[in-house]
Amino acid sequence: MNQLTGALLALPVALWGTAAWAAEPGKAESALNMTAIIMFFIFVVVTLGITYWAAARTKSTKDFYAAGGGITGFQNGLAIAGDYMSAASFLGISSMVFARGYDGLIYSIGWLVGWPVILFLIAGQCRNLGRYTFADIVSYRLSQVPVRTMSAIGTLFTVIFYLIAQMVGAGQLIRTLFGLPYEYAVIVVGCLMVLYVAFGGMIATTWVQIIKAVLLLTGATFIALTALNHTGFNLELFFKTALESIKTSALADHKKIVADGKDFFAPGGLINDPVSAISLGLALMFGTAGLPHILMRFFTVPNAKEARKSVFYATGFIGYFYILTFIIGFGAVMMVSPNPQYMDAAKGVLAGGNNMAAIHLAHATGGDLFLGFISAVAFATILAVVSGLTLAGASAVSHDLFASAICGGNVNEVTEMRVSKISALVIGVIAIWLGIQFEKQNVAFMVGLAFAIAASANFPILLLSIHWKGLTTLGAVVGGALGLITTVTMVVLSKTVWVDVFGNKAALFPYKDPAIFSMTIAFLGCWLFSKLDFSERAKAEKARYEAQEVRCEIGIGIAEASKPRVLSVPGLPGSRESFFLYFPLFFFRRGWRRP
């Protein structure tokens, strides 16, 4: 605790020394924006305070990995939404709608429709079968060492590629919003995420994600409402005005749409190849169900019912958020594209890059004050996502590889937690180094690669281990390995990497998104090698499926939740309400009584 106290006291001083500038829209390292700076520090101080509070309550591996299993369904739904709604969602989708129109919705729809799959096929089963990681579920009736090793490798590949994209995006975004040098921005994000995970574990990570979700939903709602108010909440006039604004826009994408005579509200401009469209949809939908940092959240609730409620609430929050990004995108077309203040006319892009559409719209609708708020929200968005990813990676190393595969389960909780914290530090250092190394590279493909790996290496073995009696250890390991190898190989040989990154003239693989091929290969590998496995071990694994199915459906034998590790206000009716949603009541609770 003394080490944590020293770190918490030192970090804000270091942050103040490096984050002394905040840029106006499109200007690097320019005028001081005190609103952004103040909100930035308020968020950091509050979350570090929560980390200090969580560290005192993280006494066991269950506390560290799963917040004691005492998070409610509503709270976990908010945390899942906070973990899932990344800066790529907030800034990327709204900017894609801003630049490409209707086609920008393909990502938001793809990411959203994966949640019913999780609700009906995975959520409750995960809670009943697993403890801390999705490898617990896959290895429930299969051989521990090979299956956990394969699952951990899939987790680490997904986490690393996702983290690289997040860290590069964080450095560029914070440099644009706050004027902080890129390297400093990446280091600040890396240090904060390591502090949250190493000292606060899942408890601190959960509350960082809940705060972020509330802030992001509030900010996005305000932007959308003020944009709609510009046309008196007349949707027909709103979209008509946006369409007219394209004709006078200086954006290169808009000029091309006008010159080609294309319909801004028609599909087909972004992806017009059916194979690519289906492949992208599969990666987005089933990749969501294979993301390790999302699957970990189902172990933080007491039972399968709360796990399903978590998905229900998360789906509502995420769906609402994606509706807002659609409105924000068209609002930016209407209010940002005609305004030369936000344009770099010489390059035909937005000032600061096309991903700044939502940020510029915040300034156009709310001035410097709201720009500062949204800047802090964007920072919170990045921290919440990278914290969840770091915890998932550290858990794979400490729980799956060290405690289970290497030590065979014969390790005490103190040692396992120490290894997890060291792993979080190592992952943080690697993420900072890779983030700095990839500064000049196009890393947009890495988010797609992370989802493709999750859909091809993680999801097939997770789904089949739960719902197919015939899956064996050989089938799971070979199928998962085939999915991982084919995904990485096809992405490297595609135009995105082979041409755009390596500089070759032509791609060796014709499609940008490989999921339709890699998922098929993974499922076929699982099926074929399970069918060809006639060993005694395979027979025993198939015989254990009935006991697993009983546990999977009714949850007999699952560990009881620890004392709930949540912030609550004594006297509040029900357990679903988050402290941060009822913050004002906290100050008046002495005079407040249950009706």
Image (cartoon, rainbow, N blue to C red):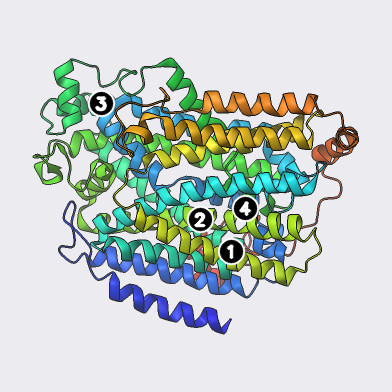
From what the image shows, is residue 386 above or below residue 417? above
Q: Amino acid at mark 1?
A: Ser
Query: What is the C-alpha distance between the residues marked 1 and 3?
Result: 49 Å
Q: Amino acid at mark 3?
A: Phe
Question: Disc 4 or disc 3, which is closer to the eye?
Answer: 3
Residue for point 43% across, 51% down:
164
Give percent across and percent down for residue 432.
41, 61
Question: Disc 1 or disc 2, which is closer to the eye?
Answer: 1
Work out whether mark 4 precedes mark 2 in sequence or the reverse, and give the earlier one: 2
- The residue identified by callout 1 is 423
Query: What is the C-alpha distance between the residues marked 1 and 2?
Result: 21 Å
Furthest residue in direction front, as rendered: 504
Question: Disc 4 or disc 1, which is closer to the eye?
Answer: 1
From what the image shows, is residue 300 above or below residue 358? below
Q: Residue 578: which quarter of the image?
A: bottom right
Q: Could you classify mark 2 by the number of other residues whose Cα lies within 10 Å: few (under 14), some (14-19), or many (20 or more)?
A: many
- The residue identified by callout 4 is 576
Q: Is residue 114 visible?
A: no
Residue for point 47% across, 77% down:
8
- The residue identified by callout 2 is 209
Question: Disc 4 or disc 2, which is closer to the eye?
Answer: 2
Work out whether mark 2 precedes mark 3 in sequence or the reverse, and give the earlier one: 2
Labelled disc at residue 336? none
- The residue identified by callout 3 is 239
CB under 8 Å between discs 2 and 3: no
User: Nearest the camera: 4 or 593?
Assistant: 4
Give percent across and percent down for residue 306.
69, 46
Q: Amino acid at mark 2?
A: Gln
Query: What is the C-alpha distance between the residues marked 4 and 3?
Result: 38 Å
Q: Secondary structure at mark 2?
A: helix
